[in-house]
Image (tube, grey):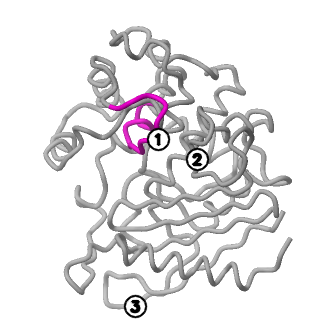
Amino acid sequence: MTCSMAGVSGIISQGEDGAVLDPSFRWHIGSNTKAMTAALYARMVDLGRCRWAASVPSLFPTIASHPAWADIRIEELLSHSAGLTDTFIDGRWLDARRADAKSAREQRRDLVERVLGVAPPESRGVYRYGNLNYVMVGAAIEQAISVTWEEGMQSEVFATLRIAEAGFGAPPRTGPWGREASGSKLKPIDPSLGEADNPAVLWPSGGVHISASGYAQFLASYLHGGPSLVRPTTLKHLLTPAEPDLGYAGGWSLDGPSASPASRLTHDGSNTLWFASAIIDRKSGRGCAALTNCGGERGAAITQRIIKRISLTSPRA
C-alpha cells in the first residue's frame, strides 16, 4: 500500500493577510460523503446492529410503506437501483428544510415517511443516481443505533480511523471559503450563511468536510494493509452492486468484474461551492484525491488536473 500523503497550495480567500493554506484546513467533499455513509452501515453490520439483504420497510418498522417497497433491499439503495430519485428536491424544498425547526434526524424521518408512502417513481433494478438513496441509508442507521447519523459517523468512522479534523456542513470560516461562480468571477461564500451548504437533512448523501490528511486516511482503509474499518468479507459485499453491471456500489463508481469487488473505485462530489475527486486502485494499492474550494465545471477541471499530475509523478506500488 502506498503511504498516505497530503499537501495543500494557495491562500485563504477571505481577509487581507493572504494567509497560506494549512494542512489541517477542512474541505467539503460533497457526494463523496456517500462512501462514508455506506462504510458506516457496513461497520454496523460487523457490529451486529445492521444486516445485509434487509428490506427497506424492515429498516423502519414503525413507518407504513407502500407495497411496492416490500422486497427492495438496502443494497439497492446503496447501488442507486431502488427506483428512487430526487423528484421533489428543488430550491423551495431546500429553503423549507433550512427554515424547519425540527432536528435533522426528525427531518430525515419525515422524509422517509414521504418516500415510503408511495411507490418508487422509477423502475427498480436500473441505475438512477439520487441523493435520497443515501439519506434513506442515513436514516436507517439512525433507526438502528438510536443516535444521529452525525454521532455515528464521528464515533464509528472518524474515531476508528483516528481522523480528528472532520465535521459536517460548510467547513469552519477560519479556513478557505467555498466559491460560487458568478460569470467569469468566483464569489467567496461565508460558511456561516445557510446558502454555504445543503440543509442538514441531506448530509448523509453529501455533507462531510474533512482535512486532506483525514480524507487520505479514509481512502487508505479500502487498500490492503490500510487502516481497518470493516472486515474484508464485509468490504467485498459493500463493493458488489445489487445487480450485475450496475457499476455502482457502496458510494463508489466501479470499474471491474460486476460479480466481485471492482479493482478501481472513483467518485466526484460537490455542493456547487467545492469540488472533490477521488480514485482508489485496489489492485496496485494506490489511491489519490484532489480537493478545491471551487465548484462546478471549473472545480472539476481543477481536481482532474491535480489527479493527472499526481498519477504522472507518483511511483508505482
Q: Earlier in the sequence, mark 3 or mark 2?
A: 3
Q: Residue at x 45, y 30 (%)?
A: 82
Identify which amino acid the numbered label 3 is placed on: Gly
Q: CA distance from mark 3 to mark 2?
A: 43 Å
The residue under label 1 is which amino acid type? Tyr
Residue under numbered circle 1 = 127
Residue 18 is labelled as 3
Residue 96 is tagged as none
N-terminal label among 1 and 2: 1
Magenta residues (range): 122-136
Give coordinates of residue 280: x percent, y percent. Answer: 69, 60
Secondary structure at badge 3 equals: loop
At which x and y percent is residue 106? 31, 27
Q: CA distance from mark 1 to mark 3?
A: 45 Å
The residue located at (31%, 25%) in the rendering is 115
Above or below for 47 versus 279 = above
31 lies left or right of 84: right
As drawn, 97 above or below 215:
above
Kind of residue at disc 2: Gly
Residues at badges 1 and 3 in contact (C-beta under 8 Å)? Answer: no
Could you say which quadrant of the image residue 94 lies in? top left
Which image quarter holds the N terminus? bottom right
Nearer the observer, disc 3 or disc 2? 2
Q: Disc 1 on helix, strand or loop?
A: loop
Element marked by disc 2:
loop
Question: Are circles 1 and 2 on residues that touch, CB within 8 Å?
Answer: yes
Report the Cα–Cα distance between label 1 and label 2: 8 Å
Question: On the rendered structure, is 308 left or right of 116?
Answer: right
Task: Label the magenta part by its dominant secondary structure.
Answer: loop
Residue where numbered disc 2 is placed: 247
Q: Nearer the viewer, residue 126 or 215?
A: 126
